[in-house]
Image (cartoon, rainbow, N blue to C red):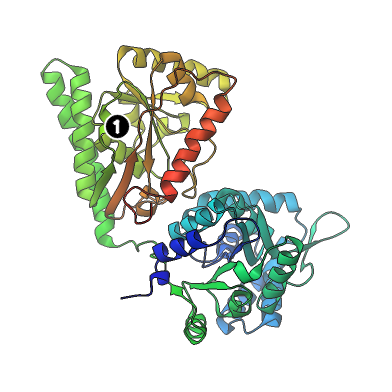
Amino acid sequence: MSDPETTVQGLMEAVERSPEGAEVGAFFDFDGTVIAGYSVTAFMRHHVKNLDLHPRTTVETLASGWQGLHGEEDFRKFLGITLRTWAGRTPAELEKIGKKLFRDEIGPSVYPEAWRLVRAHLEKGHTVVLASSATRFQVEPAAKALGVEHTIYTAVEVGEDGTLTGRPDGRSPYGEGKAAAVKEFAAAHDVDLDASFAYSNGGEDVPFLATVAHPCAVNPSAGLRRAAAERGWPALDFAGRPWTTPVEIARTAATFAGMMGGFATGLGLGLLGGSRRAGLNLGIGLGGDLSLMASGVSLDVHGAANIWGARPAVFLFNHQSQLDVLVLGALMRGNFVSVAKKELATDPLFGGLMRLLETAFVDRDDNAQARKALEPAVERLREGTSIVIAPEGTRSPTPTPGKFKKGAFHLAMQAGVPIVPLVFRNTGELMSRNAMIIHPGVVQVAALPPISVADWTREDLDERIEGVRQLYIDTLTHWPGDAGS
């Protein structure tokens, strides 16, 4: 029997037992702990693609990585090599690159387990900190997406002309430097380290972990695993993302063939019976079932009765990947139309099908066009056809739902129908944000009870919308059926 605190649920329960309040700190290392891999890799790939990485820098970076880092001085030399690429750029340029790379590459690699631990500490009112030797251009987009207010990072020197010099500014929070930075932060923010938590994956972070009462080695390197065993610290390996295999590539191809074949079969049968809508409904359900069967994906649905008990309704879902579309087909079965961003109209996989399903395509940059595109949707609701829409407007790079737009809620208010939140827990784990391959597994869905908008007003709309978004966050943090939920 394993120590309960070496499981994610055990760690969650330890957090739950801890005191509430900002005097308790929760310090998370970033690379390898919160995200799988290293954020600098995404930046290096970006520079290679844009042909702005000097060959000497590439060789020196590879050589430094091969030799390994054996202390603060080695890390500082490595940092000097990698930061050289940024010399002459403005901080604003790097902020823009960092946000884009987090959205497209780094964000989808956030460990779901790390996300749950961050949320657990935030719910206790703890002072949560991303403490990393990476730069703010790597760390701050993640902190914002995770709802984390505080960061510790390597500062980058800015010259008199307002551009980066390519050199670090001051001591980097690496090794003993990170331990010192945490102690300094704790003193400045009245954090009691004797009641605090820390999580890291690297052997260089033994001093950092030793600053708190509740350290945990997460995805530990061999050196940290030995140190954790010697010191009696809990150690935990997150599940990570599955590798892509030839079988999964073939299954994914079969998935989309099954989707189109099932839809065409259902539509044909409906048309033979003289009803286009019956054909669409049959095709949606059959296509969803066949596509998920081919991909090896099954559904575990909590609150399934809520999908059927309040139609017509505006069904919301948190958008993580293209797998969401297949899940929706299998869940909803039919008698709905969707709302999507205009870019999907030309999507090679789903564009033609979505047009056939009478999808309303909206231009997120043109409010007038978006309102006009949604007018028929109000009529469809009044006629008895439900609407399915992702209120974020785009796929979220992490499990945290992005800011909800108002369109879905205006639709429900105008048509006088309820909102039904569909919470997808892990579609992003089986098919990440920009991936083309689906991994087999179980998609967990929670269909929450319908929410009446009868007494909603324009004056309280922002508050109401944020309340619905918080429902998603709460459900994702405390999943129905999980121990302790």
Residue at (51, 81) in percent of width and height: 224
Residue at (59, 61) in percent of width and height: 48
Quadrant occupied by the N terminus: bottom left
Q: Which residue is mark 1?
A: 306
Q: Tell me, yes or no, if residue 240 can be seen here.
A: no
Report crowding for label 1: few under 14, some 14 to 19, many 20 or more residues within 10 A (C-alpha).
some
Is the residue 184 above or below the residue 75 in the image? Answer: above
Give the left or right position of residue 143, taking residue 425 as reference.
right
Is the residue 433 above or below the residue 368 in the image? Answer: below
Picture quarter containing residue 62? bottom right
At mark 1, the secondary structure is: helix
Residue at (67, 77) in percent of width and height: 75
Q: Tell me, yes or no, if residue 223 can be seen here.
A: yes
Task: Compare residues 8 and 352 and report the one nearer the observer.
Answer: 8
Task: Compare residues 432 and 187 and report the one nearer the observer.
Answer: 187
Amino acid marked by disc 1: Asn
Position in image of residue 164 (x %, y %)? 78, 59
Give the left or right position of residue 418, taking residue 293 as reference.
right
